[in-house]
């Protein structure tokens, strides 16, 4: 029993959510320091606030990876994490540029990092779950394509709003410019829409099917090992015979 090959369009649907996830990451990376400084943080103190990203990923990713391996529900195995992670990330993207104080902005950053990791970690395993071995490189390449497109668009979004749509890029002291605020709103909408597209356009194999695939793969590997062992045995005998002849 082997996994069915997917069409390019099916692989596109399966990976499209990564486009939105990377927009969230890109907006965070490009604008969070600006938001913190607007709220009164000195540039020398930004590093301690940015510890949220690596610390959160270190804690959340292995936990979510383990839990998603054991999950099965109405939305499947990985998709519940896509769904709830996207909702929480969107909420954090809306909260961040509206933060009235530093502690709320810092909390929004932690929530955003945790939520993005909840969504992103199962996405990596999604390719391995759904694609046969010969198509996995295509799946990971498609994810990389969406990561690149999303990162570029997110980084450019405030500039696009200012230079193409005449949205203000400056604001009174202590206030977030409209270009940043609207960019976060747009990014949250795109993130939610793209992840939900993947959630509702892609199916997952049931636990029973996954178990059957793993059993078939283990059996195939066992047969291959047996063949290799036989070949190695003949090889040893041939070496001994050749040695005696020499």
Image (tube, rainbow, N blue to C red):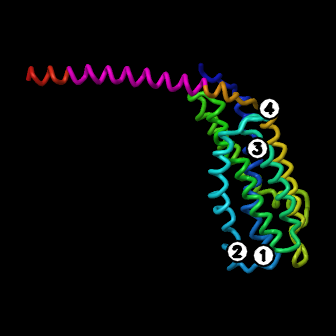
* Residue 136: image location, x then y, percent: 60, 33
Marks 3, 4: nearer the viewer: 3
Q: Is residue 187 visible?
A: no
CB atoms of marks 2 and 1 within 8 Å: yes
Quadrant where the N terminus sits is top right
Q: Whole-percent x and y of residue 158?
A: 82, 60
Q: Main secondary structure of the magenta part?
A: helix
Q: Position of residue 181 (x, y in %)?
A: 87, 62
In-front residue for pair 25/222: 222
* Between discs 1 and 4, the one toward the N terminus: 1
Q: CA distance from mark 3 to mark 4?
A: 13 Å
Q: Earlier in the sequence, mark 4 or mark 2?
A: 2
Secondary element at tag 1: helix
User: What residue does disc 3 label?
Assistant: 82
Counting every numbered tag in the picture gives 4
Q: Nearer the viewer, mark 1 or mark 4?
A: 4
What residue is rendered at 81% in x and 37% in y?
197
Q: CA distance from mark 4 to mark 2?
A: 40 Å
Callout in the foreground (1, 3): 3
Q: Which residue is mark 1?
A: 37
Q: Which region of the structure is painted magenta?
A: 212-237
Which residue does the image show at 9% across and 22% down from the upper left? 244
Residue at mark 2: 46
Q: Is residue 221 left or right of residue 53?
A: left
Identity of the residue drawn at 73% across and 29% down: 10
Q: Earlier in the sequence, mark 2 or mark 1?
A: 1
Of callouts 2 and 3, which one flags the residue occurring earlier in the amino acid sequence?
Answer: 2
**Residue named by callout 4:** 201
- Please indicate whether residue 29 sits to the left or right of residue 163 in the image: left
Q: Quadrant of residue 45?
A: bottom right
Whole-percent x and y of residue 71? 71, 39
């Amino acid at each position: 029993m082997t996994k069915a090959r997917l069409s390019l369009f099916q692989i596109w649907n399966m990976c499209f959510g990564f486009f939105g996830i990377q927009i969230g990451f890109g907006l965070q990376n490009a604008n969070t320091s600006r938001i913190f400084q607007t709220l009164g943080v000195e540039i020398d103190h930004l590093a301690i606030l940015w510890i949220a990203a690596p610390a959160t990923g270190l804690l959340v990713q292995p936990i979510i990876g383990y839990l998603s391996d054991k999950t099965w529900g109405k939305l499947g195995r990985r998709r519940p994490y896509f769904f709830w992670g996207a909702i929480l990330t969107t909420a954090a993207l809306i909260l961040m540029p509206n933060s009235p104080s530093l502690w709320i902005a810092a909390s929004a950053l932690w929530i955003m990092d945790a939520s993005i990791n909840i969504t992103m970690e199962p996405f990596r395993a999604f390719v391995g779950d759904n694609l046969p071995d010969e198509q996995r490189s295509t799946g990971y390449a498609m994810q990389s394509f969406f990561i690149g497109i999303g990162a570029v668009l997110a980084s450019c979004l405030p500039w696009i709003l200012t230079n193409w749509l005449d949205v203000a890029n400056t604001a009174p002291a202590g206030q977030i410019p409209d270009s940043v605020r609207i960019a976060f709103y747009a990014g949250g909408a795109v993130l939610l829409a793209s992840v939900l597209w993947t959630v509702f356009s892609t199916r997952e194999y049931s636990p029973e099917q996954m178990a059957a695939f793993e059993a078939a793969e283990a059996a195939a590997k066992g047969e291959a090992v047996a063949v290799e062992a036989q070949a190695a045995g003949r090889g040893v005998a041939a070496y001994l015979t050749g040695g005696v002849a020499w």
